[in-house]
């Protein structure tokens, strides 16, 4: 038998073996207690009095948490290094070293006053998948790369540098930890002078991120897994309503050109239109300010924010046009002027790969778990990975839909379910060739 035939026979045998393991459910299952204990251990780095963490990127707590995770990665047999952007990457060799790697992971930095599960579950779950491969003595064809992205909650420097869209001009920007991005990258083991070299120049076979939902849908519906259809696009505007400021005691109610009353009508209209339009779009007014801001002066100007999110840019534009129509009606009724200033850059929607969604669904079905296809209303590392490689996301429930809070919680068995789905999806990806 020549070498070419021998290789083909070996590959076929390997695929049959792995497929039979997956179909028979004989792969090892995630250890929920181990995952819980690692989450608890990680929560000590940056722990605050409210039970959450202040592990903002580049802080001492972030550096200590990253060191803890790096040690676990090395203990699991990964070859660990930090790239120039500060991403921690642990590589596990495959039988075919020239194959593009399968990458999976998330982040461990937090928002100020954050919780212990956002990002962390994806990192601990990725590590658990490696542990299970070790336990099962399974070696994939593709190399595997577990990644802990730098500063997901702030600049997204880690994922943006890896995909080549980070601007070095931003290195002088500040961060929540008080350091510039450049100094922060240096603090966590990167090199701001070489950050452009963090761009991945070789292909990535696929990227998968396990994450808590950060919403309440799975918890409310008692579902085990969310299969993410994509990460929503986000468009922002500054809205200005101009009326006429005048004395609040001497100006009769009829004929007033009150900018705040007009703005209030528009804000209610925005909520009503976004609620009643078909689809899953959301529109939010999160900041508002009236001028001149005195209690006895009719507001002559109001400024407020407008944010619209949806999985389709076309739908975002449709919602905005409807809102502009609402604004025209308010202008006519209240004799005011309303303008919209688009803020850039907009975040484009990032659909996940349909093929990976199917593989995740197959993995969920193998484990007899309940699931729902759903969008992600929050941004993730996967958002910037999707344009460069087939990308998938797996959600596990967030109790009460709470996130970015010390009350954030995902049960150990839910974390374990996520790790089990992630492992089986990785193995299916190892079988799959993308065109």
Image: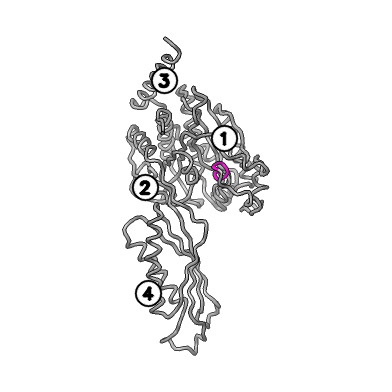
Q: Do residues under tags 2 and 4 come within 8 Å of each other at their CB atoms?
A: no
Q: How is the image coloured?
A: one colour
Q: Is residue 175 left or right of residue 369?
A: right
The disc, 2 or 1, on the residue closer to the chain's N-terminal end is: 1
For marks 2 and 4, give the one nearer the viewer: 4
Per the image, the residue denoted by label 3 is: 11
Examine the rendering and report whether any part of residue 43 can be seen. no
N-terminal label among 2 and 4: 4
Q: Regarding mark 4 in the picture, which secondary structure is present there?
A: helix
Q: Residue furthest top?
A: 1
Q: Which residue is mark 4?
A: 329
Find the distance from the CA under tag 3 to the CA under tag 4.
66 Å
The front one of 333 and 220 is 333
Query: What residue range appears in magenta?
Result: 159-163
Say what secondary structure mark 3 lies in.
helix
Residue where numbered disc 2 is placed: 374
Q: Secondary structure at mark 2?
A: strand
Query: Mark 3: few, some, or many residues within 10 Å (few <14, many ≥20)?
Result: some
CA gap between label 1 and label 3 equals 27 Å
Above or below: residue 197 compared with residue 252: above
- Circle 1 sits on which residue? 89
- Mark earlier in primary sequence (4, 1): 1
CA gap, disc 2 and disc 4 = 34 Å
Apparent side of residue 28 relative to residue 166 in the rendered image (left or right) = left
Give residue 304's position: percent from left, percent from top.
49, 68
Q: Is residue 327 above or below residue 26?
A: below
Which of 54 and 308 lies nearest the eye of the viewer?
Answer: 308
- First along the sequence among labels 1 and 3: 3
Q: Residues within 10 Å of mark 1 (few under 14, many from 20)?
A: many
Task: Give the prevailing secondary structure in the magenta stretch.
Answer: helix
The secondary structure type at the circle numbered 1 is strand
């Amino acid at each position: 038998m020549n070498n070419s035939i021998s290789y083909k026979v070996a590959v076929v045998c390997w695929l049959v073996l792995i497929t039979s393991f997956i179909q028979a459910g004989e792969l090892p299952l995630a250890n929920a207690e181990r995952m819980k204990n690692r989450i608890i251990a990680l929560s000590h780095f940056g722990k605050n009095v409210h039970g959450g963490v202040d592990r903002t990127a580049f802080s001492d707590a972030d550096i200590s948490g990253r060191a803890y995770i790096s040690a676990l990665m090395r203990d699991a047999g990964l070859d660990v290094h930090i790239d120039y952007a500060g991403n921690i990457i642990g590589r596990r060799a495959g039988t075919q070293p020239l194959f593009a790697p399968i990458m999976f992971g998330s982040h461990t930095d937090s928002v100020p006053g954050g919780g212990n599960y956002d990002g962390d579950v994806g990192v601990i779950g990725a590590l658990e998948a490696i542990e299970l491969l070790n336990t099962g003595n399974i070696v994939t064809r593709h190399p595997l790369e577990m990644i802990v992205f730098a500063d997901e909650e702030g600049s997204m420097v880690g994922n943006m540098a890896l995909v080549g869209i980070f601007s070095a001009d931003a290195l002088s920007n500040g961060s929540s930890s008080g350091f510039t991005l450049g100094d922060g990258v240096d603090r966590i083991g990167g090199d701001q002078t070489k950050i452009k070299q963090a761009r991945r120049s070789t292909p990535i076979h696929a990227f998968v991120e396990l994450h808590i939902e950060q919403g309440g849908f799975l918890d409310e519906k008692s579902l085990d897994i969310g299969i993410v259809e994509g990460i929503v696009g986000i468009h922002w505007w500054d809205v200005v309503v101009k009326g006429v400021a005048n004395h609040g005691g001497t100006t009769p109610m009829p004929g007033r050109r009150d900018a705040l009353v007009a703005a209030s009508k528009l804000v209610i209209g925005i909520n009503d239109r976004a609620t009643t339009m078909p689809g899953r779009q959301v529109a939010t007014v999160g900041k508002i300010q009236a001028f001149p801001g005195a209690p006895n002066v009719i507001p002559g100007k109001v400024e407020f924010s407008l944010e619209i999110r949806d999985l389709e840019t076309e739908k975002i534009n449709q919602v905005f046009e409807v809102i502009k129509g609402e604004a025209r009606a308010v202008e006519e009724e209240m004799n005011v002027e309303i303008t919209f200033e688009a803020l850039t850059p907009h975040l484009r929607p990032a659909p996940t790969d349909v093929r990976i969604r199917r593989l995740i669904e197959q993995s969920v079905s193998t484990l007899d778990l309940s699931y729902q296809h759903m969008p992600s209303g929050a941004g993730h590392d996967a958002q910037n990975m999707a344009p460069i490689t087939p990308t998938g996301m797996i959600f596990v429930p967030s109790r009460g839909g709470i996130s970015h809070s010390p009350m954030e919680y995902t049960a150990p068995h839910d974390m374990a379910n996520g790790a089990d789905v992630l492992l089986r999806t990785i193995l299916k990806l190892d079988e799959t060739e993308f065109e």
